[in-house]
Image: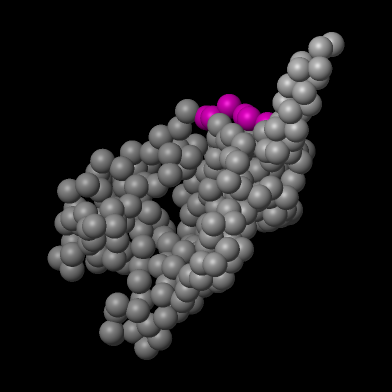
Amino acid sequence: MKPGNLIFVTAFFLLAGCGPNVQIVNHPKPDLKVDFSPFEEMGCPRNQSGYLNCQEDSSLYGLGCDFIRPASEFLGGLTPAYPLAVCIYRPYIHPELTDRYSLPDGEYFFNEGGTMPDLVRYVILVDGSFKLIKNPDEFRAVFSPVDSQEEALSFSLVMKNLYATYGREVDQKLDYYVKVLEDTHVEKVNDDYVVHVFAYQLFGCGPHNTYAIDMKVTVDGFVEEIQREKIFNDPANDDLCVD
């Protein structure tokens, strides 16, 4: 080999070693969708944040929704396939409440708003009428049993503040903590399902890590976290503090 070629090959391997040393395992994305159309003309005009802000004379406001938004397409595995929307209730804008910064656990699924709570509920359309679903027990009464991998994925995302990702690629800007990183996927384990999803640590001060989480979903619709692993961080957000 000529000296010039040797220098080129060495430089190539040095450069190749500069990127993140992580293997990405992709999985096929399920073809799912959720019908949001019945909610679009229900007295909830869209605000600058993209939320539909329900007016006090709206039937959805009367149900207990200050805002609504389209649900993730990955909730399209639910059966029956009712039209569905995410319903956000903000207790701190309701002066009639005794405690405007919290509600009993049975009144919502999870808080996605931190110290200024945005409490997540769901609304479905059944036989021409809107129905509020405030908690996991009410949700299971409508949608269980869980009888497919797609429905297990939907259940895991409904119950907790998690998300699904497909087609992931290596991002040179991220600091990776793992050698292998997989897309969302679902496995059948005995009579249960194990769903591989993700969570982002938004609140607090940096680093704001992303976690891979395995959720067990039973046929009866009960959801339980069984494993959590820190997978990467964007160092550009290390100085960011979020309340």
Residue at the farthest bottom position: 98
Image quadrant assignment for residue 182:
top right
Q: Is residue 174 left or right of residue 161?
A: right
Residue drawn at (24%, 57%) of the image? 48
What's the image's color scheme? one colour
- Magenta segment: does it hold 176? no
Q: Position of residue 140 (x, y in %)?
A: 53, 53
Residue drawn at (34%, 42%) of the image? 83
In the image, residue 90 sits, relative to residue 43, either above or below, namely: below
Q: Position of residue 137 (x, y in %)?
A: 53, 60
Give the tally of numbered discs. 0
In the image, residue 235 sits, relative to residue 76, either above or below, namely: below
Q: Position of residue 65 (x, y in %)?
A: 31, 64
- Magenta-drawn stretch, dominant element (helix, strand or loop): loop
Residue 27 in sight from this viewpoint: yes
- From the viewer's side, name the closer residue of 81 and 93: 93
Q: Is residue 97 left or right of residue 10?
A: left
Residue at the farthest top position: 1
Residue drawn at (62%, 36%) of the image? 170
Residue drawn at (78%, 26%) of the image? 10
Residue at the farthest right position: 1
Q: Is residue 32 left or right of residue 52?
A: right
Q: Position of residue 87 (x, y in %)?
A: 35, 58
Q: Which residues are magenta?
A: 25-30
The quadrant in which the N terminus is found is: top right
Residue 111 in sight from this viewpoint: no
